[in-house]
Image: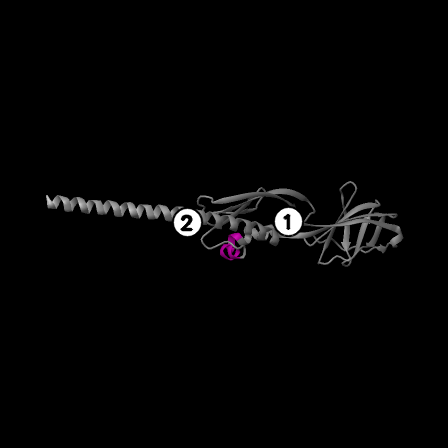
Amino acid sequence: MMAKKKGAAHLEIIIAFTLFISFTFFLLYFIQFPKQNRLAETSLEILQSKFEQDNYINLTRISIKTNSSGCFSVAFNTIDGNLKSLVRDTDGDILHSKMESSNIINIDSSKNFFIIYLSSDFLDSSSLSCDRLLPSNYTIGGIEKSTILSYKRLNSLVADYRDNYLTLKTALGIPQNLEFAIKSNIKGFSLEGTQQKEDIITAKTASYPVLYSDGRIEIKEFTFEIW
């Protein structure tokens, strides 16, 4: 009888110990899981912010009306940066243009109203030298400055993700125990596949205008993922 009681006591101790261990793991899981979620959500916000910061470039838009046509140069307020020009007429056609300095541009146009776009990402144009117009022969309608995603920089980002993932991950502020990916509907743009993807903890999709080197501007979607 005593042996049976001792056996039952041992069984109760084993069951109690098993229940205690199970409860402890259960409690730790539900304490840790919200922390992991909060860390992932914070990392997602940092990822998107760093993505914008590192891939935005300046785009300047200047509208000008002249009293002349042909090959001429006009001056405007100095704009900082090593900029290249792209000029469109009222039909949207690209005109031959060339920056002469930070505030002087040469334009070859058969029309007298056009829009100048200035950016570091535009393609280099061939040389062009024109006579300077007097300020009384042209009117600057306005100068608009904005920021826009650079297609050129996005291509560099793809290469960094593929070849230097850990360095890029650190630069983007992603903790060591998390991984990230960025997807887009831009052809050839994909920041995924380098790391084994597990269940996504948090994700966010946003739309941005993207500037191409040929002057095109397209709205594209980007999805940021953390796991």
Decide: few, some or many residues near mark 2? Use Cα within 10 Å; few <14, some 14-19, many ≥20. Answer: few
Question: From which residue to which does the magenta span run?
Answer: 161-170
Residue type at mark 1 is Leu
Q: Are marks 2 and 1 in contact (CB under 8 Å)?
A: no
Residue 47 spot, x, y in % from top left: 55, 51
Q: Residue at x 33, y 46 (%)?
A: 23
Q: Secondary structure at mark 1?
A: strand
Q: Residue furthest top?
A: 91
Q: Residue at x 19, y 47 (%)?
A: 10
Instruction: Let me know if residue 122 appears in the view.
Output: no
Q: Secondary structure at mark 2?
A: helix
Query: Is residue 166 located in the magenta-colored stretch of the structure?
Result: yes
Q: Which residue bears the numbered disc 1?
A: 149
Query: Is residue 212 located in the magenta-colored stretch of the structure?
Result: no
Residue type at mark 2 is Gln
Residue 56 spot, x, y in % from top left: 64, 52
Q: Residue at x 85, y 55 (%)?
A: 131
Q: Nearer the viewer, residue 72 or 196?
A: 196
Pick whichever of labels 2 and 1 is earlier in the sequence: 2
Q: Residue furthest left?
A: 1
Say whether residue 83 is left or right of residue 23: right
Residue 214 spot, x, y in % from top left: 69, 47
Quarter of the picture holding the N terminus = top left
**Residue 81, placed above or below residue 3:** below
Q: Nearer the viewer, residue 36 or 224?
A: 36
- Residue 32 is marked as 2
Q: Residue at x 40, y 46 (%)?
A: 30
Say whether residue 166 is left or right of residue 23: right
